[in-house]
Image (spheres, rainbow, N blue to C red):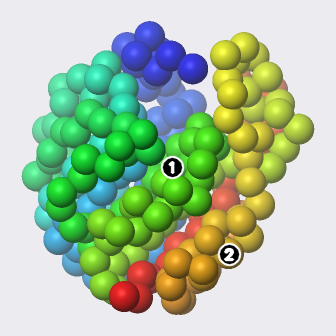
Amino acid sequence: MSFDEQAAAWDTKERAMRAKRIAEQIDFVIGDRKYRHALDFGAGTGLISFSLTNAPEKITLLDSSSEMLRVASEKQSATKAHLEILCADIVEKDCLTDKYDLIYSSMVFHHVRDIEAAMVTLSSHLENAGKMIIVDLVSDDGAFHRDDTDFDGHNGFEAKTFADIMLAQGYTDITSEIFFSGRKNKTVPYSLFMVSGIRRI
């Protein structure tokens, strides 16, 4: 999928409303803890990060689409957090140099071919006792991306897939739940899950 081509028109009312609900769930999982530096993996136009109430002191918006990040940079005043924009594909090459105490992603992993490798890379940049939060599509029959002719990712996942990966990579306090249901373009039903865990080194 060409996210660069879709960037200018990405922030639809439907996506903004969904992002607000996802951000509310992330805020709930974060609780009262104050995070120092978060990584928004696959940030796109920053819809999730800009919707957080309990925003970390600093957020790195990471995406492989320069156009998505260009749109995000134009909205920096939407958050009180200090923002860093980073255009890179860490699945192809790990170019991250910082450590984070919070990493979150939304609707990203179903576009990633090797999810375990991506998790290894992300986990290597998560501090001890840092939190990982993943939101993605619940497995379906491919309906969500049926009209995207160039889509070559996963048709969603079971939350247990990520819970098992986290467990194998040394995470504790792992929780998972299906927290959102909606309709894409008012016609295609879909659901989202959230899995979170604490990394222990």
Picture coordinates of residue 163, whole percent (x, y): 65, 74
Amino acid under disc 2: Asp
**Is disc 2 placed on a helix, strand or loop?**
helix
Which numbered dot is residue 164? 2
> Quarter-wise, where is residue 188 in the image?
top right
Mark 2 or 1 closer to N-term? 1
**Quadrant of the drawing holding the N terminus:** top right
Q: Residue furthest right?
A: 141
Rendered view: 178 above or below 71: below
Q: Residue at x 50, y 28 (%)?
A: 13
- The answer to whether residue 95 is left or right of residue 185 is left
Of 186 and 122, nearer the camera is 122
Picture coordinates of residue 84, whole percent (x, y): 15, 45
- Between marks 2 and 1, how big is the CA–CA gap? 18 Å
Q: Residue at x 26, y 62 (%)?
A: 38
- The answer to whether residue 45 is left or right of residue 73 is right
Residue 57 seen in this snapshot:
yes
**Quadrant of the drawing holding the C terminus:** bottom left
Q: Within 10 angstroms of label 2, few (less than 14), some, or many (20 or more) residues?
A: few
Which numbered dot is residue 10? none
Picture coordinates of residue 58, whole percent (x, y): 15, 59
Amino acid under disc 1: Ser
Of 160 and 53, nearer the camera is 160
Q: Residue furthest front?
A: 93
Q: Which residue is mark 1?
A: 106
Q: Residue at x 18, y 26 (%)?
A: 74
Residue contact at pointers 2 and 1, CB within 8 angstroms: no
